[in-house]
Each structure stands twice: as structure tokens, then as C-alpha cells.
């Protein structure tokens, strides 16, 4: 089945220690998104790729970076995680410009010690 | 500014009908999406309205009125498994999510 896959499902890191979260998709969608979601809040869009074009949200901290080496894979790098970065990180995809229909992966829950 | 407002919590009884409202203020608006998210799970796409009127998908329907900057999600024949958070998301120059409505269903 075509899907969005995120690894790992749970990630524990230390304060200030760089961490990378992974997302892959078999849907062959050209748009990939990274969201941060904290408890009882809406998903917060961090950035998205339209093909290779990177689009950063204005309020996304510089501490967050992303890489998309090919259509199928996208990575979220947190350079120096703080306690406030503990959250669920969701990867999503959509076909073309159809932002209205996004397919989400199961998420990676990040714990910062 | 751009924003979407929806009630934080709605309570309903199993088998009943419930409506979750969403009012929006977005630049370059061209549509409203709805997502369902169970606790600990990922959002799942439910419905999308680009035009005024009602879109029906099984027990779920979504409505949009552009003139009123308003939409709603209608859930019929509620089942316990429908207990979840429901998000509206406005599609325009930016993609803006509402804060979510927690739907509590009682037997």
C-alpha cells in the first residue's frame, strides 16, 4: 500500500544534541511537509518542499532545517534541541498544488532530556 | 491577520448528529479542508470544500459559505469511534489550521 513512513516513531535526545527525523513516501507526491504538534494544539507547519523548492514558514526557528535528497525522502534536522522542542513531528505529502488533501505519516514523538 | 476559529470542545450522544463550525479569515482563500485526529494518531483527511454548498461523504458532510467566511463539518449517526479532534484548515496564500475541536461522544 502506498503510504507515508516516519522513522523512528519515538526519539529521545539530549538537550543540545543534534537529531534527525526521517520521512519517506511511496505515493510519488511532489510536495512534502513537516509539522510540529504539541499536546492539544493544531499542527504547526514548519516548512514544505514543492519538488526541490524549499519553503520556510516565517516563524520557523533557525534551529530547524530540512533536506530532501530525492522525491521519496525528506529529513528534519534539529541542530540544538531545547526542552521546548519536545513534540510530535508529522510528515505529510500532497500531490502537486493540492495542499487541501494531505496524507500524514504516523509521526515521530521527540523527547528532549 | 489570518486565522480560523472553531469551538474547543463539543459533546454529543452516540447515534446523534453533531455540527462543528469553523469561521475563517485568510488571504487569497480558495478552500477549506477538514481532518480527523485520534489521540496519539496522525491527522486523516476527511473532506474539502472549494465551492459554496454541501459535500457529502458517507456519514460525514462538510459545508462552505464563502460570503459568510464560514464552514462546518456535520457528523451523522455518531459512533464511539468518532471521538477525536477535528481540525479545519484554510487554503489560501498560506495554509492555516484551526486549533481543533475535541469531540466527546457519550453512550
Image: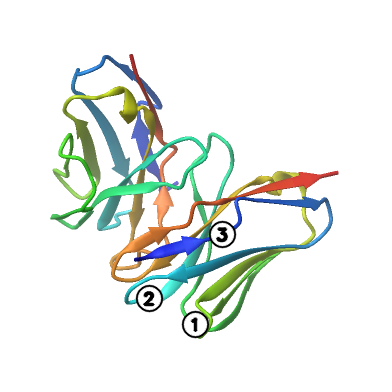
Where on the picture, by quarter, is residue B95? bottom left
Assess whether mark 1 and mark 2 are in contact (beta carbons under 8 angstroms): yes
The residue positioned farthest toward the front in the image shown: B1
The numbered disc on residue A37 is none
| Residue matched to label 2 | B29
Mark-to-mark CA distance, 3 and 2: 17 Å
Q: Can you identify the residue that label 1 sits on?
A: B66
| C-alpha gap between disc 1 and disc 3 | 16 Å
Residue A6 coordinates in the image, percent (x, y): 36, 35
Residue in view at x 32 percent, y 77 percent: B28
The percent coordinates of residue A11 (x first, y second) are: 35, 21
Quarter of the image holding residue B31? bottom left
Chain ID, mark 1: B
User: How far apart are the two marked residues, 2 and 1, measured between alpha carbons?
Assistant: 9 Å
Q: Residue at x 58, y 37 (%)?
A: B39
In this rendering, the count of numbered labels is 3
Amino acid at each position: 500500500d502506498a503510504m507515508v513512513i516516519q522513522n523512528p516513531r519515538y526519539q529521545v535526545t539530549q538537550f543540545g544534541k543534534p537529531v534527525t527525523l526521517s520521512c519517506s513516501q511511496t505515493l510519488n507526491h511532489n510536495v512534502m511537509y513537516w509539522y510540529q504538534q504539541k499536546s492539544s494544539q493544531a499542527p504547526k507547519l514548519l516548512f514544505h518542499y514543492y519538488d526541490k523548492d524549499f519553503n520556510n514558514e516565517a516563524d520557523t526557528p533557525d534551529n530547524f532545517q530540512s533536506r530532501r535528497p530525492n522525491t521519496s525522502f525528506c529529513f528534519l534536522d534539529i541542530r540544538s534541541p531545547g526542552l521546548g522542542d519536545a513534540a510530535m513531528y508529522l510528515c505529510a505529502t500532497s500531490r502537486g498544488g493540492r495542499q487541501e488533501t494531505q496524507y500524514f505519516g504516523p509521526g515521530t514523538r521527540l523527547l528532549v532530556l | 491577520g489570518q486565522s480560523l476559529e472553531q469551538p474547543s470542545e463539543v459533546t454529543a450522544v452516540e447515534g446523534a448528529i453533531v455540527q462543528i463550525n469553523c469561521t475563517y479569515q485568510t488571504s487569497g482563500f480558495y478552500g477549506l479542508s477538514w481532518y480527523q485526529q485520534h489521540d496519539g494518531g496522525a491527522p486523516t483527511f476527511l473532506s474539502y470544500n472549494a465551492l459554496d454548498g454541501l459535500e457529502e461523504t458517507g456519514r460525514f458532510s462538510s459545508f462552505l459559505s464563502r460570503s459568510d467566511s464560514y464552514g462546518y463539518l456535520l457528523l451523522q449517526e455518531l459512533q464511539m469511534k468518532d471521538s477525536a479532534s477535528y481540525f479545519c484548515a484554510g487554503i489560501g496564500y498560506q495554509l492555516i489550521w484551526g486549533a481543533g475541536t475535541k469531540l466527546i461522544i457519550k453512550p
